[in-house]
């Protein structure tokens, strides 16, 4: 029977003990006794008996000489293996480069740090026992990121990684912006800033596999490129990947007559809500909103009333030499509960805007229309005003308000292929998964702000962030599948697993510290072994 080393917390302080099993002849069973090794100081046992402190390793044979964070790496290493991330990287990189990249990825998931601090974190983890001579000085890491950014390794990896997507996958596509105050990145441009920080930005798009819960592709664009401008490139990529029978879910920001024509021409199954910028869409909404509330279109969705009426959009596409009619099927939905909440919020905001404009006293040098625009923003379209004797006289445009209110709770989803109203709505509403993915990238993985000096380093950094995002989102999906998400957030689960240490003995032998009941339950649920 082998003894094990464990750390006990007593009155808030950590102490090393050796747990020694022995057979009790009288009780006829295996029992345990603990042998004190020392106080835990800097990951090592130090006996505190008298001054000076004497390391316990000088007194106890095979005493531990160090403890390393280990447990929180286990799920990440399992996902790395299951998704063939290491083997795919090794197709394009040598083993040392692969280990450096994975160290950066694991750090980005567990404890995002500046490059100059990564080596310190690495030395406190069990990774340092597996790769004790891995060069992780900040200069070396910068060189690795720059080399990645200059190479085609990221694009080659993404193509190989995405080829694992199963037939019939539902793919989500969206784009976000990453801001930076750097003066050295040509990709930084001013555009629609989703974080409202007033800084120039780069745009990053993601394609996400909804069933597996992971991103399978990312792409980098200059900050001034509009959402719709990235779609054609993504559609071409999807065609080259030859993913069978997939369906693409898009947000309304990607809708245009050109995008619609491309989706139909490429025969890509899709779901997309149209905007009201096209006259054909306005006419369809106008005729549909009066009929959709009929009892014949009444259904139940998530225990609430929902109306769904089949519609067909016919749009004359005149941007080619020979005009043609684009015909797309869809559903017009009417959600009474959503209508009520939208109506209440709209009228409250409208009232507040009117009051603010009425009480505004713009400076003499500011034009009144500019002042109204700054206060009312997009609500300015519902106001009629005059500027008399330094004051605003405001009235509400009732027709404009009526048109807006009549559309509340009503929306159209267009699709290609065969789909019932429930599948169409359910799939579209699940696209919030990609929005959560971006939230994880920006906040949990600390993708913002970008403090990088060269475009090559930026591209390398985003590749590391993409790989970290894959691991983080897959772990979250595993927690949902096993029910762990009901008890833990991802961060809390990783913190709990951090209690499992890899212990190195003076003899060179390595062993895992005692696993608590709580951690054992987590490991078993995830199919892991410490």
Image: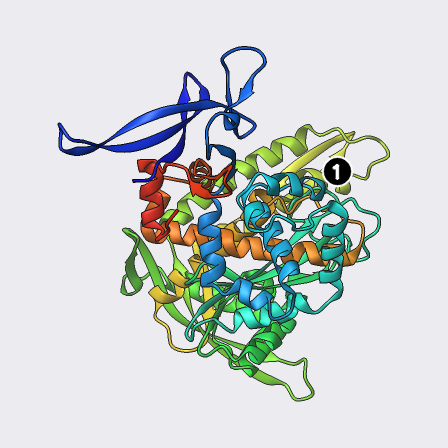
Q: Which residue sits at x=52%, y=57%?
A: 470
Q: In the image, is 403 to the left or to the right of 383?
A: left
Name which quarter of the figure residue 239 lies in. bottom right
Q: Report the front residue among 106 and 333.
A: 106
Residue 465 visible in image: yes
Q: Residue furthest bottom?
A: 322
Residue 255 visible in image: no
Q: Which residue sits at x=43%, y=72%?
A: 166
The spot of residue 412 in percent (x, y) is 46, 64
Q: Is residue 125 above or below residue 155?
A: above
The spot of residue 455 in percent (x, y) is 78, 57
Q: Report the front residue among 191 and 315.
A: 191
Q: Report the front residue among 147 and 211.
A: 147
Q: Write down the residue under mark 1.
A: 371
Neighbor class of circle 1 (other Cα within 10 Å; few <14, some 14-19, many 20+) is some
Q: Report the front residue among 141 and 163.
A: 141
Q: Residue furthest top?
A: 50
Q: Is residue 290 above or below residue 303?
A: below
Task: Assign a secondary structure to mark 1.
Answer: helix
The spot of residue 245 in percent (x, y) is 44, 78
Q: Which residue sits at x=43%, y=57%?
A: 429
The spot of residue 465 in percent (x, y) is 61, 53
């Amino acid at each position: 029977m082998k003894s094990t080393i464990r750390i006990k917390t007593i009155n808030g302080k950590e102490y090393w003990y050796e747990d020694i099993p022995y057979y009790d002849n009288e009780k006829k069973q295996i029992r345990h006794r603990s042998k004190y090794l020392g106080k835990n100081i800097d990951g090592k046992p130090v006996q505190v008996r008298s001054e000076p402190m004497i390391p316990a390793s000088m007194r106890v044979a095979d005493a531990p000489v160090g403890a390393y964070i280990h447990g929180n790496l286990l799920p990440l290493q399992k996902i790395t293996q299951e998704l063939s991330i290491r083997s795919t990287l090794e197709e394009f990189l040598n083993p040392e480069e692969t280990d450096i990249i994975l160290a950066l990825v694991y750090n980005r998931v567990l404890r995002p740090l500046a490059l100059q601090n990564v080596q310190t974190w690495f030395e406190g983890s069990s990774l340092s026992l597996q790769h004790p001579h891995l060069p992780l000085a900040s200069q070396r890491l910068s060189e690795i990121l720059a080399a990645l950014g200059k190479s085609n390794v990221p694009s080659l990896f993404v193509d190989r990684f995405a080829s694992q997507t199963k037939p019939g996958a539902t793919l989500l596509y969206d784009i976000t912006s990453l801001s930076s105050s750097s003066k050295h990145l040509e990709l930084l441009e001013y555009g629609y800033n989703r974080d409202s920080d007033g800084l120039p930005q780069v745009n990053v798009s993601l394609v996400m596999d909804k069933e597996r819960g992971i991103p399978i592709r990312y792409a980098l664009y200059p900050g001034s490129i509009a959402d719709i401008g990235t779609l054609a490139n993504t559609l071409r990529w999807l065609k080259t990947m030859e993913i069978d029978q997939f369906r693409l879910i898009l947000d309304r920001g990607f809708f245009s007559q050109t995008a619609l024509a491309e989706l139909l021409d490429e025969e890509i199954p899709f779901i997309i809500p149209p905007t009201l910028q096209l006259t054909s869409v306005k006419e369809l909404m106008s005729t549909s909103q009066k009929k959709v509330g009929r009892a014949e279109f009444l259904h139940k969705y998530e225990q609430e009333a929902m109306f769904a009426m089949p519609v067909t959009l016919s749009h004359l596409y005149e941007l080619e030499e020979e005009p043609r009619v684009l015909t797309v099927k869809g559903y017009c939905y009417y959600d009474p509960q959503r209508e009520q909440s939208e109506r209440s919020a709209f009228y409250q905001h409208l009232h507040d805007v009117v009051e603010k404009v009425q009480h505004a006293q713009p400076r003499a040098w500011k034009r009144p229309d500019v002042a109204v625009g700054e206060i009312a923003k997009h609500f300015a379209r519902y106001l009629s005003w005059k500027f008399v004797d330094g004051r605003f006289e405001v009235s509400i445009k009732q027709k404009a308000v009526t048109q807006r209110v009549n559309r509340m709770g009503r929306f159209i989803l267009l699709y290609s292929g065969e789909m019932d109203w429930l599948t169409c709505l359910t799939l579209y509403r699940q696209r919030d998964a990609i929005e959560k993915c971006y939230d994880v990238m920006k906040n949990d993985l600390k993708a913002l702000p970008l403090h990088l000096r060269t475009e090559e380093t930026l591209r390398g950094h985003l590749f590391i962030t993409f790989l970290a995002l894959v691991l983080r989102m897959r772990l979250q999906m595993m927690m949902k599948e096993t029910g762990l998400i009901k008890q833990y957030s991802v961060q809390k689960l990783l913190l709990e697993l951090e209690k499992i240490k890899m212990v190195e003995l003076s003899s060179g032998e390595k062993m895992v510290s005692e696993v608590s009941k709580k951690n054992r339950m987590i490991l078993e649920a995830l199919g892991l072994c410490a």
